Image (cartoon, grey):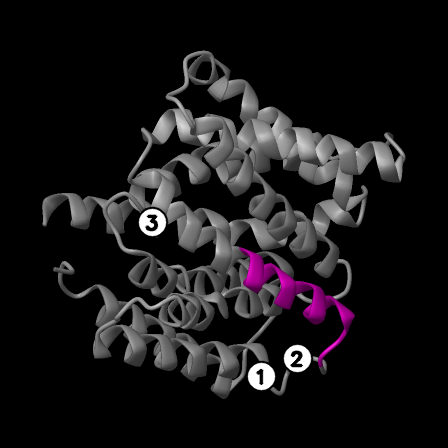
Amino acid sequence: MRRYALGLLALSVVTLLWGTTFVVVKGAVAEMAPSLLVFLRFLMASLFFLPFALRLPKGAWGAGLELSFWLLLGYASQAVGLLYTSASRSAFITALNVVLVPLFLGLAGRRLGLPVWLSALVAFLGVGLLSYDPKQPPMNVGDLWTLLTALNYALYIIRLEVYAKTFPSLPLTAVQVLGTTLLGLLWVVWERPALQGIPWGAVLYLGVAATALTTWLQTWGQRHVPAPQAAVLYTLEPVWATFFAFLLLGERLGASGALGALLVVLATLLATRRSPA
């Protein structure tokens, strides 16, 4: 129970840090190409984990590279989506993985309890109210890119649950970060973006706090928190994103958006109120 509680705390910190990134990334992609941003943030994060990549358990490279693939697709589609959609809406649509995770696990034959399904549906309703608040513009191409983000994050959460229980957190995090850096480099080489005007302050924050720290905390936290509960907990991310978007960008929610945020919090409490058997 203690490890489960600590896992919940770690993943809660992850959602807080993730919530800050939508504002930062939206500002950064206005000044630099998404491919360069993704590559630089993971390159910076990889510097912290190089020592742990020198001695890896058998099979860690294969697991880490698979997770890197889902990570790159998730971060890339989210960064591209933020070129066209708002920071708060991007966070809400990303949180749709709360329904995709139990859906995929159910299709794979895993039996999930009623509280998990109920909390996922409540979170889904809350995210819907948040995403399609009347004060925000109608759906656009950025939202479609972000739907791809939600799909990739769902697959990442499911696969991370498997590998996080097999390998130590720090080596597995090291391979994920290094693998995503290499894949991001391929994207940069293919796109050949301009290298001037890079907002290094944003890159430093995203690399250290929002990539190195969050990837490690998420990997460690999901050793002790099952994927369905983790997915519901991650829906706190758009609540934090809304707060920071309001604080820093002036983006506001109407009554339906506020109700949606409340439903997300209630869903999180329902899903995580006790340790799973």
Residue behind mark 3: 11
Q: Magenta segment range? A: 139-152
Q: Residue at x 77, y 33 (%)?
A: 186
| Disc nearer the start of the sequence (3/2) | 3
Q: 88 and 187: which one is in front?
A: 187
Q: Position of residue 15 (x, y in %)?
A: 41, 53
Quarter-of-image position of residue 179: top right
**Residue 129 appears at what percent x and percent y?**
50, 83
- Whether residue 208 can be seen here: no
Q: SS for tag 3?
A: helix
Residue 249 is at least partly visible in this image = yes
Find residue 149 and name its label. none
Residues packed near mark 1 inside 10 Å, few (<14), some (14 to 19) or many (20 plus): many
How far apart in space, not on screen, are marks 2 and 1 (Cα)? 6 Å
Decide: marks 2, 1 in contact (CB < 8 A)?
yes
Amino acid at the residue labelled 1: Asp
- What residue lies at 42% left-to-right and 30% top-to-bottom? 172
Based on the picture, tell me whether residue 190 belongs to the magenta stretch: no
Mark 2 crowd level (few <14, some 14–19, many ≥20, 10 Å Cα): some
Question: To which residue does mark 1 refer?
Answer: 133
Residue 181: x and y in percent read 64, 30
Amino acid type shown at disc 2: Gln
Mark 2, residue position: 136
Which element carries disc 1, helix, strand or loop? loop
| Residue 148 on the magenta span | yes
Quadrant in which the C terminus appears: bottom left
Q: Secondary structure at mark 2?
A: loop
